[in-house]
């Protein structure tokens, strides 16, 4: 890594009763990047964020944020970070402007500066129109945006976002993503936990996959996808030909294909098979293919492979239904 | 921590001097009091409900019970009742602090405070301090309603002021208890379930009827209830009927009601203020 990491953790352990929430978590986030912490429910993502943001103490291990040890100098760390959580942690009864001013004062900005900063943030993140309405009348997306900008009052060097878009509609998610991209462009480092793999795919420079309180894989989204190889997808005109097609694909790829109705998928080592060969071999076996494509795996597939579990609870459309068309990173390289 | 930090030792300046910390605690506490004020301004309906409720109690208890209860030693029942109501409302309204604190805790506002570089004890101090405002408002509206229905303070300005100061102090002690409870339950629904528990505690006292007619075991409970001591203290200081007269066998808190109320209040603050501050500051969850 070219720069000294701005967020680092070494062998963090944390136990709640009999449960190991963190079991030797290591982490290093380079300044000015977005790091996506991915993991199934209960993997320890939130615990990691709570320790890094000084809300919880680790049982053992060391963590530094913005040059300060989180256990030894929590106030120094607090002055350098912003935290936006799974909730809209603002006062429902105050207006958006009132919330920003109050938190500005609690950040010890002089009154006038707290006002100016509130107006700046409301303006920049499109909440000016709603500024003088009480928050309980805001939509879910507006609340979450207010929550996010409340954590930006002090222009934090490091921003922790714990599942910032869980439960939001696609448009609101897009707005949060735009806001995060804008912050990163200004030089803020973001550590983001998410269950949405497309979120990590679109926002994160680096992805750290956590399971059972430990890092099980890390890299750029592309590196992670490459690590499990490409996928060969074949759609058949007639499901009855699936058996013959499977034999052809198994012969070419050296692995047994997954069959789903008239669609077969088999993992490939990159560059091992040419699409033209696949088409010719299928043709020779008398199989009519409607579509043959070589594609990168989605992060969902990477995740499933790494953790053996789907990434998300049932209320999320992308993960649990393998038959559903997946909107994430499906880049098809069709026959040229 | 197992591994000692090999790099830069913590500079002494990392911990600001005591004076600065106290100043920030006060400033942050005031900001939170300001927050309460803007909430009240935003939700005048809530304020009106909070103020109308005690007034309704005065009328309800004063005329419904008052029509049938004879005051020991004679006198106007509404004069007998008012000190009890002052105390009762101090107790019941404390649940509002618990609810506010629990709401902040369950919605992540407390975590936001904890992750900010603000004075650690400012939040509980601010919450308990803001409640004094509510307490003063409530007492004022009760006093006005009381005057309307015929209650009077008979012993002059100083004992009257003393009674109200005593009520404010008691209320402050109760605010700390309420604040602590809110920090512990961290959930509005759970906090809500405590509300019906407060009411019987305030009824099991001398505020509505003399304890003399109760069975001995219940009477002992009622006599040692802080509500009774505070009510007796107010009766004494306001010169209202029903003030305990010294006789053999009178429970100690009723024989020395002002001292007993002071002690109760100080005990509440001494126990619950440190507990609340510690609970707020505790990390690890």
Image: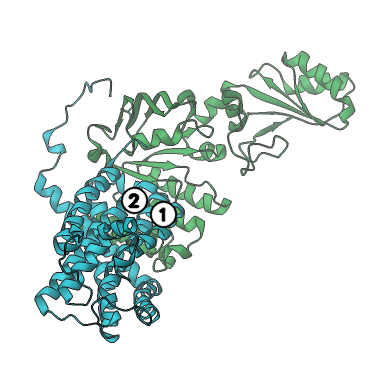
Chain colours: A green, B cyan
Name the residue that disc number 1 marks: B191
The quadrant of the image that shows the N terminus of chain B is top left
**Could you tell me which secondary element the residue under label 2 belongs to?**
helix
**Residue A132 % position (x, y):** 39, 69
* Pointer 1 with pointer 2, Cβ within 8 A: yes
Name the residue that disc number 2 marks: B181
The answer for how far apart the CA atoms under marks 1 and 2 are is 8 Å
What chain letter is assigned to the residue under label 1? B
What chain letter is assigned to the residue under label 2? B
Q: Nearer the viewer, residue A239 or B281?
A: B281
| Residue at position x 28%, y 53% in the image | B177
Q: Which of marks 1 and 2 is nearer the N terminus?
A: 2
Q: Is B171 situated left or right of B284 in this image?
A: left
Judge whether residue B193 can be spotted in this image.
Answer: yes
The quadrant of the image that shows the C terminus of chain B is top left
**Image mark for residue B273:** none
Q: Nearer the viewer, residue A258 or B33?
A: B33
Mark 1 neighbour density, 10 Å: few (under 14) some (14–19) many (20 or more): many
């Amino acid at each position: 890594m070219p720069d000294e990491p701005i967020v680092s953790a070494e062998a963090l352990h944390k136990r709640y009763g009999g449960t190991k929430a963190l079991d030797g978590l290591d982490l290093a986030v380079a300044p000015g990047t977005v790091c996506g912490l991915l993991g199934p429910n209960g993997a320890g993502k939130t615990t990691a964020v709570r320790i890094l943001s000084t809300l919880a103490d680790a049982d053992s291990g060391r963590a530094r944020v913005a040059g300060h040890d989180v256990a030894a100098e929590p106030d120094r760390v607090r002055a350098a970070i912003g935290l936006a959580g799974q909730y809209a942690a603002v006062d429902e009864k105050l207006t958006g402007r009132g919330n920003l001013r109050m938190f500005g004062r609690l950040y010890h900005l002089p009154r006038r500066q707290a006002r100016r900063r509130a107006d700046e943030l409301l303006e920049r993140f499109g909440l000016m129109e709603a500024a003088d309405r009480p928050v309980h009348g805001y939509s879910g997306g507006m609340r979450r945006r207010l929550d996010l900008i409340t954590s930006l009052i002090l222009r934090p060097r490091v921003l922790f976002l714990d599942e910032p878009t869980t439960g939001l509609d696609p448009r609101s998610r897009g707005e949060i993503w735009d806001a995060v991209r804008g912050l990163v462009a200004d030089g803020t480092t973001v550590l983001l936990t998410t269950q949405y793999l497309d979120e990590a795919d679109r926002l994160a420079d680096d992805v750290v996959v956590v399971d059972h309180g430990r890092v099980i894989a890390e890299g750029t989204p592309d590196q992670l996808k490459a690590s499990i190889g490409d996928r060969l997808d074949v759609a058949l005109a007639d499901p009855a030909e699936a058996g013959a097609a499977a034999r052809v694909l198994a012969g070419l790829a050296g692995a047994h294909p997954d069959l789903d109705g008239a669609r077969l998928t088999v993992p490939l080592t990159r560059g091992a098979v040419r699409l033209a060969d696949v088409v010719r071999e299928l043709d020779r076996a008398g199989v009519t293919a409607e579509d043959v494509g070589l594609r990168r795996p989605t992060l969902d597939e990477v995740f499933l492979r790494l953790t053996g579990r789907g990434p998300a609870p049932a209320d999320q459309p992308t993960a649990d239904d393998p038959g559903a068309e997946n909107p994430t990173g499906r880049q098809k390289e069709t026959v040229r | 921590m197992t591994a000692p930090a090999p790099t830069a030792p913590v500079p002494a300046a990392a911990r600001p001097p005591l004076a600065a910390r106290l100043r920030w605690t006060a400033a942050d506490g005031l900001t939170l009091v300001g927050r309460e004020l803007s909430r009240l301004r935003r939700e005048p309906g809530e304020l009106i409900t909070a103020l109308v409720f005690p007034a309704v109690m005065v009328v309800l208890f004063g005329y419904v019970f008052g029509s049938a209860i004879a005051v020991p030693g004679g006198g106007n029942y509404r004069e007998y009742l008012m000190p009890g109501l002052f105390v009762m409302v101090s107790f019941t309204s404390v649940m509002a602090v618990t609810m506010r604190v629990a709401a902040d805790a369950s919605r992540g506002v407390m975590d936001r405070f904890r992750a900010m570089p603000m004075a650690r004890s400012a939040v509980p101090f601010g919450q308990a301090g803001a409640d004094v405002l509510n307490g003063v408002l409530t007492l004022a509206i009760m006093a006005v309603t009381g005057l309307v229905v015929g209650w009077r303070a008979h012993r002059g300005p100083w004992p009257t002021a003393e009674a109200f100061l005593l009520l404010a102090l008691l209320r402050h002690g109760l605010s700390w208890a309420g604040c602590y409870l809110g920090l512990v339950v961290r959930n509005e629904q759970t906090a809500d379930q405590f509300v019906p528990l407060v009411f019987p505690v305030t009824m099991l006292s001398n505020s509505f009827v003399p304890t003399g007619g109760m069975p001995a075991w219940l009477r002992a409970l009622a006599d040692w209830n802080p509500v009774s001591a505070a009510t007796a203290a107010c009766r004494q200081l306001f010169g209202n009927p029903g003030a305990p007269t010294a006789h053999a066998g009178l429970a100690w808190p009723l024989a020395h009601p002002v001292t007993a109320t002071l002690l109760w209040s100080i005990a509440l603050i001494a126990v619950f203020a440190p507990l609340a501050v510690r609970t707020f500051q505790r990390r690890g969850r």
